[in-house]
């Protein structure tokens, strides 16, 4: 087995043998995994926080984590109802009446039924079958599970999966780990990050030369791009998937996060069913949801689910088997999911407070989405599409050629160089666009809209000023 | 893409196209995954429960789930201290002071430090570094992560992993999914399921003909076999791993579950460190622990951790990266783990009650372990090794040749046939030995010792009587 140079020199210095498990000898697929949302920038942010605690002087007094959609870490108070649980009903459905017992691997039956009723209400009465609902450890877990099912073949028959660019890097990371082929389709930045079916055709046609495309992933509302798909767009995507025989994965974890006037969330399930034959009864679809986003932002509980539609029954059994190896999703997260999908009814005593809290959170997010777009678009060299939904802006930044050269000298992506400098000088932690994918020669970053409104305003202005200074410095 | 026969005929009947994702076309590695603890027996148990609820007459009134180590589902009350949390201290360490925020991917730093101190106390003061502790979603999650790192190569250079037979099927399932080679070493049933280093040599030697063995998994106390390894045995295993250049995985989730007089838990970490050079500073080791077992049995929270020892620093970074793709372990599970590793001190007000509850649970488990061995060994055709630790008996059953033939006609493993009949006639749900692995021609089942003592006695007697009747029926 090959041993890395570092290991070899260490071995020589200390008279040690090389490790059994080295960087060179380890799983090459795992090495290829990248996940920018928690990459080197966040690593550095942690170090800076430590330095601040140790009293090291910095040009800022705190690190602002605008890198990840973590509402409660940004000071959002938990929704009261979600913390004053309908405990008795849920505990009755638990083994031993305790959150401390395993549930069945697909999740507590009562909660699967509540999820199905939630989906039916959301989709205007279109039926949902609890047996097609599988609870998961956050949405990520369910997305990985469905992707695992799809991966097969070798060489030119390897499974290809179409993903948007920019994308949420769970997709690229998982495809790398599974050894599947990532097939990029580009969202159209000039049209507010719209998904264009002509671009899907281009991507698919090219991919067929070297792999077997079998699935299409859509993120709606978009992460990191914040667009909300129109109903027409969703119909066109479904028609495309059906004609090209692609399994559809609809990442709909931001379904409650729609802010722009004229934008509305349409679930892929609802649109598919309303399209009727031949689509409704045949197009295979998996739709994912989570407790981590929306108005609740309960990330730490790792609650989520997938609803599968038109999935082959034998494959569905295989999926359940695969889930059972990990025993069950965390039961407190299942309980929380139940509260999210069964909010208080108008006749419930907690209704008024719940509605008020929920609306307050969503109204503030809408204001912050608007503010972000405004402030960034006033800054020379920064342009920002409307944040129609989700929790992020993904502005494009002009970087001067000398900054790009300097980054290349340092072996960094130019936007990584920009974001690292931003972090060092302002304490603001955002994620470089290169971690999500972007058109060659363009540079972006992802910033959450989650900090409290007045703080967010200061951050946006500080960031814009930093960009101006950075541009000047390298011009 | 090939389509299964079922799909084709269905397609013909309904004028439908074949699915994109079919049993034939799906990930072949996922198809090869097997996980008996939640396999067809448990599926059938669920159906039987439903039938009982619907009033279908059965020769029993309830299904007894003796298939899985789920203490609270069996009526064990949660330890009071674990539900009256030291909330403030833990919440202070959470983002936004809320369990609803993500933690860093390796787990909350405060809790990693508490885990390190727990390990130090457990191991008589041998230092543990919090930076080598990674919290996880139950122990399973961490075990899969470490195995993922190890998998590489193709054909004759594919990674081989030595696992005990009988084993906990997480190992076989994960190796199948990762495409690694499972290398079986047999525990010695005649010597109370002892691990014999000569058998490790045999297994390794044979495996080297067709793969590259890189890791050795040990489960101590044993699951499903209940043996507790002696210190001498652990030393011999470490020497073997060192000489043969194998990464050691020590599954120590039952470290609090030791019952037999003369048996004692020795952690691999402690023994390794006490062996001194060249082992202590070089042998790579990952040790796993969980909140799901022990005296606490908090399965639903999915808390756990891995401590890595002598792991290559670059590989450790890769492991952290891989964990970060899934964001973080469930935070309520992290909080619970903190309470498990930081129990009340003698000066704390909750100390007396905590100790009393803990000791009561462990004393009852010890009595149930003894009872199980006694009752089974009194039954003709059943022999049961002492349950020295963990939560299961794994008795050997004689099955008459005609029963074996009948099973083969039905396409079932003989012990699966026995366990299915047992379930149908008595409602007792246990797992066939074939799901764990056993020597060719021998038959076993795994049964938990968790039901309350008097109920367990009735179950053991009922099961023994059923075996006698079954034997008579097929003789």
Image (cartoon, coloured by chain):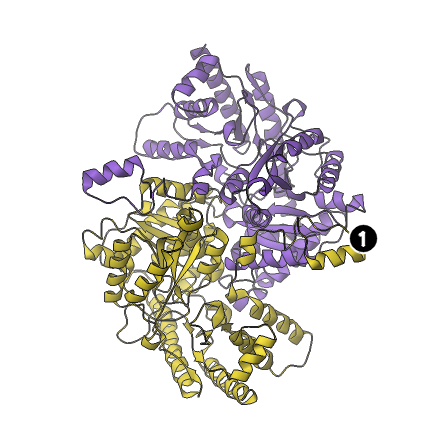
Chain colours: A yellow, B purple
Q: How many marks?
A: 1
Toward which corner of the image does residue A449 lie, by quadrant?
Answer: bottom left
Can you name the residue that lies furthest to the top here? B475
Name above or below for residue A306 compared with residue A397. above
Name above or below for residue B345 compared with residue B437. below
Can you name the residue that lies furthest to the front here? A209
Q: Is any atom of residue B120 visible in this view?
A: yes
Q: Name the secondary structure under disc 1.
A: loop
Name above or below for residue A430 compared with residue B441. below
Toward which corner of the image does residue B129 lie, by quadrant?
Answer: bottom right
In front: B204, or B296?
B204
Name above or below for residue A399 compared with residue B388. below
In front: B456, or A175?
A175
- Left or right: where A461 falls relative to A427: left
Name the residue at 69% across, 34% down. Answer: B229
Toward which corner of the image does residue A11 lie, by quadrant?
Answer: bottom right
- Left or right: where B222 falls relative to A282: right
- Left or right: where B179 falls relative to A125: right
Classed neighbour count for the residue bearing mark 1: other residues with Cα under 10 Å, few (<14), some (14–19), many (≥20): few
Q: Position of residue A285 (x, y in %)?
A: 31, 53
Q: Position of residue A109 (x, y in %)?
A: 36, 45
Q: Position of residue B39 (x, y in %)?
A: 44, 35
In front: B349, or A409?
A409
Name the residue at 49% across, 22% down. Answer: B463
Tell me the residue that label 1 is attached to: A15
Q: Position of residue A133 (x, y in %)?
A: 34, 49
Q: Is any atom of residue B291 visible in this view?
A: no
Name the residue at 34% across, 77% down. Answer: A190
State which chain disc 1 sits on.
A
In front: A419, or B214?
B214
């Amino acid at each position: 087995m090959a041993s890395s140079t570092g290991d070899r020199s260490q071995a020589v210095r200390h008279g040690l043998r090389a490790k059994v498990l080295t960087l060179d000898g380890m799983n090459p697929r795992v090495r290829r995994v990248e996940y920018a949302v928690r990459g080197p920038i966040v690593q550095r942010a942690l170090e800076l926080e430590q330095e601040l605690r140790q009293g090291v002087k910095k040009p800022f007094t705190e690190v602002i984590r605008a890198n990840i959609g973590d509402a409660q870490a940004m000071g959002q108070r938990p929704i009261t109802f979600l913390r004053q649980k309908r405990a008795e009903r849920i505990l009755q459905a638990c083994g031993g009446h305790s959150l401390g017992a395993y549930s069945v691997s697909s999740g507590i039956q009562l909660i699967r039924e509540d999820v199905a009723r939630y989906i039916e209400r959301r989709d205007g009465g279109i039926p949902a079958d609890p047996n097609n609902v599988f609870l998961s450890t956050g949405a990520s877990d369910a997305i990985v599970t469905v992707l695992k099912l799809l991966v097969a073949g070798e060489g030119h028959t390897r499974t290809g999966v179409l993903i948007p660019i920019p994308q949420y890097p769970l997709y690229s990371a998982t495809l790398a780990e599974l050894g599947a082929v990532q097939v990029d389709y580009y969202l159209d930045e000039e049209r507010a990050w719209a998904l264009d079916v002509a671009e899907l055709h281009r991507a698919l046609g090219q991919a067929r030369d070297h792999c077997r495309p079998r699935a299409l992933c859509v993120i709606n509302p978009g992460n990191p791009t914040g667009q909300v798909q129109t109903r027409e767009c969703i119909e066109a995507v479904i028609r495309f998937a059906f004609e090209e025989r692609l399994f559809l994965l609809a990442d709909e974890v931001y379904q409650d996060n729609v802010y722009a006037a004229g934008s509305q969330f349409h679930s892929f399930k609802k649109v598919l069913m309303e399209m009727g034959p031949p689509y409704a009864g045949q197009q295979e679809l998996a739709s994912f949801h989570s407790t981590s986003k929306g108005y609740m932002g309960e990330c730490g509980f790792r609650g989520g689910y997938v609803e599968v539609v038109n999935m082959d029954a034998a494959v569905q059994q295989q999926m359940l088997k695969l889930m059972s190896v990990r025993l069950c999703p965390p039961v407190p997260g299942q309980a929380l999911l139940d509260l999210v999908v069964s909010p208080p009814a108008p006749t419930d005593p907690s209704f008024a407070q719940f509605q008020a809290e929920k609306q307050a959170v969503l109204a503030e997010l809408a204001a912050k989405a608007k503010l972000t777009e405004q402030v960034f678009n006033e800054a020379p060299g920064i342009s920002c599409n409307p944040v129609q939904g989700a929790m992020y802006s993904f502005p494009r930044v002009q970087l001067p050629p000398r900054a790009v050269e300097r980054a290349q000298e340092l072996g960094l992506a130019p936007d990584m160089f920009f974001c690292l400098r931003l972090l060092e000088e302002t304490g603001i932690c955002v994620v470089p666009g290169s971690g999500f994918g972007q058109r060659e020669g363009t540079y972006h970053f992802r910033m959450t809209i989650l900090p409290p409104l007045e703080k967010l305003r200061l951050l946006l202005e500080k960031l814009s000023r930093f960009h101006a200074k950075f541009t000047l410095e390298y011009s």
